[in-house]
Image: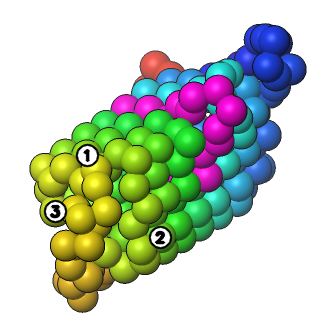
Amino acid sequence: MLQHAPAVSWKPGGFPVVSANAFVHETAVIIGDVVIKDGVAVYPFAVLRADEGFPIIIGEYSNVQDGVIIHCLKGGSVTVGKRCSLAHGAIIHGPCEIGDDTFVGFRAMVMRSRLGSRCFVGHGALIDGVEIPGGRYIPSLAVVTTPEHVASLPEVSPERAEFAREVLRVNRELCGAYLNLHRRGELCPNKPR
């Protein structure tokens, strides 16, 4: 569902801009100044809400999986780079910037932070108030809130980098397949298959 954001004292109302070459599931909620670029897939029950901080920008060929929440504090924005995967249930709370080719795992939380390109955030990790250089691995359930935590992060292994690339390949194909179903009128709720 695409929805206007209300006008408030610090910003005018806004409405999402979604590429014709992006797939947004009908149960996803996209509010306000959200920009969804070519090849993006936004899956069921994701919420992208740019009514307080704005804009929220999702870069080309990224995927926003089931139940992901993206929001931002007043005065900030969220930028997700190209070819990123935000896995099931992740929370991205801005101000925040996620570099190209970054994977964010299940139920991970990224808040008030900047992640460089090609990072891999493990499932359930918490990243808050830090800047992480490109190519770093944040282990599952890790808490990264200080420069000392950041300094101790290892580089992403080739196996994890390949896993992230495979997630992108799968979701790029799914995006195209969903768009084809939609264009043929076959993507309708409660319609027998």
Q: Is residue 27 left or right of residue 185?
A: left
- Is residue 37 on the magenta stretch? no
The residues tagged by marks 3 and 1 sit, at their Cα atoms, a distance apart of 10 Å
**Residue in view at x 21 percent, y 78 percent:** 154
Dot 3 surroundings within 10 Å: few (below 14), some, or many (20 or more)?
A: some
Q: Secondary structure at mark 1?
A: strand
The residues tagged by marks 2 and 1 sit, at their Cα atoms, a distance apart of 16 Å
Q: Which mark is residue 139?
A: 3
Q: Nearer the viewer, residue 189 or 28?
A: 28
The answer to which image quadrant residue 45 occupies is top left
Amino acid under label 2? Gly
**Residue in view at x 39 percent, y 66 percent:** 132
Amino acid under label 1? Leu
Q: Which residues are magenta?
A: 61-79
Colour scheme employed for the rendering of this structure: rainbow
Q: How many marks?
A: 3
Which x, y percent locates residue 44?
44, 33
Q: Nearer the viewer, residue 59 or 188?
A: 59
Which x, y percent locates residue 29?
57, 25
Precedes in sequence: disc 3 or disc 2: 2
Q: Nearer the viewer, residue 80 or 94?
A: 94
> For mark 1, what is the residue?
126
> For mark 2, what is the residue?
116
Q: Is residue 5 left or right of residue 172?
A: right
Q: Nearer the viewer, residue 184 or 28?
A: 28
**Residue in view at x 67 percent, y 48 percent:** 57
Amino acid under label 3? Pro
Precedes in sequence: disc 2 or disc 1: 2
Residue 6, compared with residue 187, is above or below; it is: above
**Residue in view at x 26 percent, y 73 percent:** 151
**Residue that protrudes farthest toward the right in the picture:** 12
Look at the image and tell me in which quarter the C terminus lies: top left
